Image (cartoon, rainbow, N blue to C red):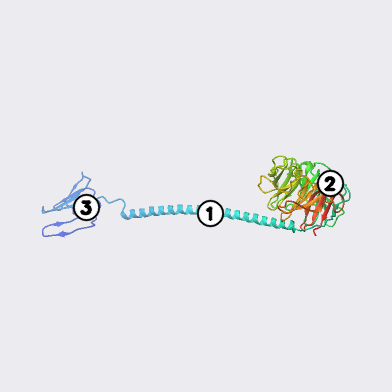
Amino acid sequence: MQSLAEIMPITIKQIFDDQDDDKYKYGVQCSFLPEKIIYENDTVMNDSNDKSIDAITTTTDNKTALHLQSKWKPVFSVTLIIWICLFVFFVILIIIFGAVSGIYLHRTLQNNSQLQENILAEKEKSNETIQRLANELKYMQNIPKIAFDAQWSPSGETVAGGNGIGSATNQLQYPWGLLVDDDQSIIIADFRNHRIVQWKKGNTTNGQIVAGGKGEGNELNQLNGPTDVLIDKETDGLIICDRNNQRVVRWLHRIGTTQGKVLIDNIMCNGLAMDDLRYLYVSDIEKHEVRRYQLGDRNGTLVAGGNGQGADLNQLNRPYYIFVDRQQNVYVSDNNNDRVVKWAKGAKDGILVAGGQGQGSALTQLLHPLGLFVDTLDTLYVADQCNHRVMRWPQGAKQGIVIVGGNGSGAREDQFHYPYGLFLDRNGNLYVVDQWNHRVQRFSII
């Protein structure tokens, strides 16, 4: 017989010892038992046929029996399970943190992108505002502020032409529109000579050809009946209404330029204007309308007329010359309606500002008006062609004031023979194209 300790690989974890006079009890927990083993009266017996061990029984003097219950040891300990749970918890926490961080980063990037867009938008608005203010300042510098009761010398001084009709450099032939540059140079559309000429300040004997002058034609180095001209300061270019070629062209503003570039074609243009945002305005005497163009655009946007030939306030009848103020109001010399109308930006109808009382020579009337100019007080100056005079119409006035001419048709210094284009320089001096006298007259402000 073998002892119990020699054949049982048992680890005793707990022994409870309760002792009284005649009985002992031992409680033993086993970690592993390969076979069912029965102990009786200190004897060990093996039952190899039963692999499931349910109990160990020990009997002492047939009085005491010790039952030892056996259990399988768990695969995972409680500590390991706790560590697994903690690991899973931290993994979930990391995932949640990553997701939240990703969302926050995404929103931050979106906000940064939106912020950058807002900054760029505000920068563009600021640049536009600065440009608009600069243009308005330039406008205020170039457009004179003239007192309500201002007067001009009644006799003009010939500053260009005046040497009879002809094509020599000291002559003009039925000139139309004109402008005065910042350096006081006078630039004239010399209609029948098919050229643009420039007369420098102080030189009243000869002009210089700055565009055309190659005879009547439609080549890019030619003009055919130019009626108006303006300067685009941004490009130092001359923009010319080449009417009989039905086009608007641009020439570089310098001596020796050999040809121009077509900006707009298929238009019976007559008058030109440019606002402080560099939009180009062109009158069309065939379609009886005025359109605004962004440079490079050949379709344009209707800003006046366009409802057929007529005398209603939404119509025009041969609009010859135009002027655009700093609010983008368009003034139109509505020639065959003997009136001047103002079209506010976006308006469907014009507002009568001068004439419109039928043909005649009264102070309330105009007779085929042509050249226009508006000063900073919104006072209108108009060449009253067939009345051979220049009139001044304060804003809201019911009648005009004759400021020069009005002494009948003639060639004296105080007369006109069909005044066409007109212009006021920054000092308020008045320049008038005296067409049939083939000259330009300057009337000094007093």
Please tell me whether mark 2 or mark 3 is closer to you in this view. Answer: 2
Which residue is under mark 3? 7
Which is more toward the observer, 211 or 331? 331
Instruction: Residue 248: tell me if it is visible.
Output: no
State the residue in front, 269 or 7: 269
Q: Secondary structure at mark 3?
A: helix
Q: Are marks 1 and 2 in contact (CB under 8 Å)?
A: no
Q: Quadrant of the C terminus?
A: bottom right
> Label 3 neighbourhood size at 10 Å, few (<14), some (14-19), many (20+)?
few
Reading the image, the residue beneath label 2 is 174
**Dot 2 amino acid type:** Tyr
Q: Which residue is mark 1?
A: 111
- Label 2: few (<14), some (14–19) or many (≥20) C-alpha neighbours in 10 Å: many
Question: What residue is at 48 percent from the left and 52 percent from the top?
Answer: 103
Three-letter residue code for mark 3: Ile
Which tag is nearer the camera, tag 1 or tag 2? Answer: 2
Farthest right residue? Answer: 164
Residue 441 visible to the viewer: yes
User: How far is disc 2 from disc 3 in space, using C-alphas?
Assistant: 140 Å
Q: How far across and how far down the image is residue 418, in percent?
A: 82, 47
**Which tag is nearer the camera, tag 3 or tag 1?**
1
Mark 1 or mark 2, which has the lower sequence index?
1
Q: Nearer the viewer, residue 72 or 47?
A: 72
* Mark 1 neighbour density, 10 Å: few (under 14) some (14–19) many (20 or more): few
The reply to whether the C-beta atoms of the residues labelled 2 and 3 are less than 8 Å apart is no
Q: Secondary structure at mark 2?
A: loop
Identify the mark nearer the N-term, 2 or 3: 3
